[in-house]
Image: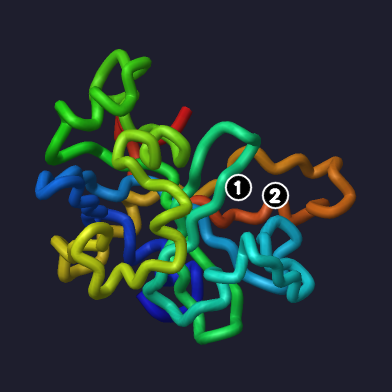
Amino acid sequence: MSGDPITVARQLLGQQLVRVVHGARLAGTIVEVEAYLGAQDRAAHTFGGRRTPRNESMYLPGGHAYVYFTYGAHYCLNVVCGKKDEGVAVLIRALEPTEGMDLMFASRTKARSAADLCSGPGKLAQALQIDRRLDGIDLRVSPVLFIERVRRQPLPENSIVISKRIGLNPDERRVGAWAERPLRFFLKDNLHVSR
């Protein structure tokens, strides 16, 4: 989980995110991610070297979690992937649930189907009970939140779709052309990708 965010984003696809709650495993295959390229990236929380208590964990070495609260409504989980103080990360946008779905449905009472459980960054955080208490955790050694490597080989190129990131406004002066950059990666034809 260390390296440039585009490479790490591709490597994360097909791996499994695991959350352990009171001894129960909640897990899902990572099917959608977005890369955030740090100080140069106008859409990144660390654009221009911005450093605040909220984004401090994004400056940790690769392998740590950056969890933030957004829109006053939900949490988002990122995998920090650069060197210490680099401020780059990959947002986990969607999972295909594989374990602990009963507990996920209990956490996401509005979910109507398995495809709706983790099909967005806020949904997956709610389903897996991820919040700011997990911010800064080391995903490589944590027993409660970690990435389980289930694939040794990268996914075939023709199974990955690349697009612009979601929810960025190109008319917003701060973001500008960065809203159009192809930094979102997801599994082709997967029903669990965010809408």
The number of numbered discs placed on residues in the rendered structure image is 2
Q: CA distance from mark 1 to mark 2?
A: 5 Å
**Which structural element holds mark 2?**
helix
Q: Is residue 88 visible?
A: no
* Label 1: few (<14), some (14–19) or many (≥20) C-alpha neighbours in 10 Å: some
**Residue 52 spot, x, y in % from top left:** 70, 67
Q: Residue at x 59, y 54 (%)?
A: 182
Confirm or deny contact between disc 1 and disc 2 (CB under 8 A): yes
Residue kind at label 2, given as amino acid type? Glu
Between residues 58 and 129, which one lies in front from this camera angle?
129
Is 86 above or below relative to 29? below
Q: Is residue 23 visible?
A: yes
Between residues 146 and 184, which one lies in front from this camera angle?
146
**Residue 132 spot, x, y in % from top left:** 47, 52
Q: Residue at x 23, y 51 (%)?
A: 19
Residue that label 1 marks: 164
Residue kind at label 1, given as amino acid type? Lys
Specify whether 37 is left or right of 1.
right
Residue lying furthest bottom: 84
**Residue 15, quarter of picture:** bottom left
Residue that label 2 marks: 180
**Residue 50, quarter of picture:** bottom right
* Label 2: few (<14), some (14–19) or many (≥20) C-alpha neighbours in 10 Å: some
